[in-house]
Amino acid sequence: MKRASTTFASVASLVGVVALSPACDQFEGRFSDENEFSAGGADPYSFPPAYRGTGHVRQTAASGTFTEVGGFVDGEPIGYFQFPFSPSQILTQNYPNVSANAWPEGVIDPLRVSGPGTDFRQSLNNPVPVPSVYNFDPPGNDDPFPPGHRCKAPPNYVHNRFLEGVPLDEQWNVFTFLPDRFTSWPIGSLPTWSYRPVVAEVPVATQNLDCQQVKSERRLLQFADEGKLGVARGEPEKDKRFGVLGKPNGRYLAWALIDPGAAVARVGTRVDVLQGGSITGSGIQKYGWYGQFIVAYIDGGYIPTEPGPNVAGAPTERMRVQKLYYPRSPVYRDGAAPASAAPGNFGQGYDVLQGNRFGDDSSAYSPVCELWSYTLPGSTAIGDLPKDEATILALANSTLEPARVPVPATAFNTPATIVPRYIFCLQAAPRAEEAP
């Protein structure tokens, strides 16, 4: 495998056992009901491009790389992993405008997380599906992960990450949805999808469980019935093999499912140690289960929410955003000639955000960013750009603009570059913490 060196050997070996995509549970009933074995890595073949990584080859698993974007909050450096909304949810370059026909009552709202349009089990009239995730022993604060695992490891067990693909001293969380659900790759056209890195949390209390004994939702609910796990139950599932599903607690997480074999790099690091890089690419992502398949995800933490408008007679809830600022005026690299300046853009390492998830005051943090641009007089070296919101407001408040809607193309003008109004901006670790 071309990029086997970018991830640790155990994950690379798991991805090598890739089977057909389990996105529609076509494997349900084919595996043993008595013993849930690991079926290997979930096949990312039909994952939307952004969830395969930069440089990926569709036919080759683990061929892409996810690289953290640099930025600043209150003058302090931070990093985030950028993911797009679906072209059916937000205006996107090279795609037609978002159609209101698929939205309940024609009300387009890409930030909606509850209410009409969010049912992840149906594709029709559900443009913003919000699946559940079973999260083991969340502490109930701003961190979705407990300080230690409560499952039972084998006696005197020490995990060998180079020989064992699945550690037996922790229990991975269980997902109910993959990025390739409701995704299509029509011949001669760009792919379409409705996946967002948003999940509704279903807390699971470990009571009497061997680590990694649960690898699917079906087995998890079975163990809950047997008293090995504590799970609040909600509505019955139509498939009677599942019974009554877990009930979300009203909290939402930004967990981006990615190619399980792809490398993940921090700001300023380069993967592939055999090619001169400094990291393996396996220090940031976390791992979970989907129907006995291994999945990987980047954790962006809890998503703050706020009430939305009533739609089709029902209340809605939507994600609260934070602002991301970038210059649209010309910028140039430090030490380069000002004549080399070009218009600034987001995601280039000099973004300014409002919230730091790992700062002293994380209340302004959201893993969803609303893009705003500003203009400075003349050309500016990157090192001289503002690094906090207060300075931007003091220097360029009158120039602030949200994402522009391009003028339609005609015989007399060409279409402008589309800047999305929102992006996902997942802060997965403190900037000072480098991946091993």
Image: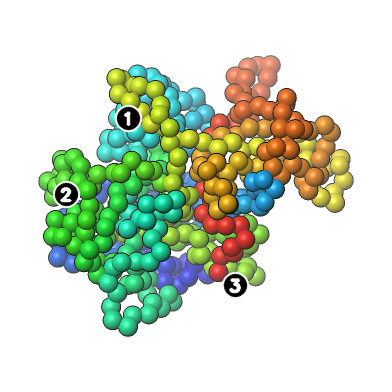
Contact between marks 2 and 3 (CB within 8 A): the answer is: no
Q: Amino acid at mark 2?
A: Phe
Residue at figure coordinates x 48%, y 70% from the top left: 8
CA gap between label 3 and label 1 equals: 49 Å
Q: Are marks 3 and 1 in contact (CB under 8 Å)?
A: no
Up the image or down, 64 lies above or below 303; here it is: below
Local packing at callout 1 (Cα closer than 10 Å; few below 14, some 14-19, many 20+) is many
Residue 431 seen in the figure: yes
The kind of residue on which mark 1 rests is: Gly
Marks 3, 1: nearer the viewer: 1
State the mark number for residue 115: 1
Q: Please give the name of the residue rendered at 50% of the width and 26% of the height, measured from the top-left corner.
A: 96
- Amino acid type for the residue under numbered disc 3: Leu
Relative image position of residue 300 (x, y in whole percent): 48, 50
The residue at which mark 3 appears reads as 274
In percent of width and height, residue 185 lies at: 41, 40
The residue furthest bottom is 156
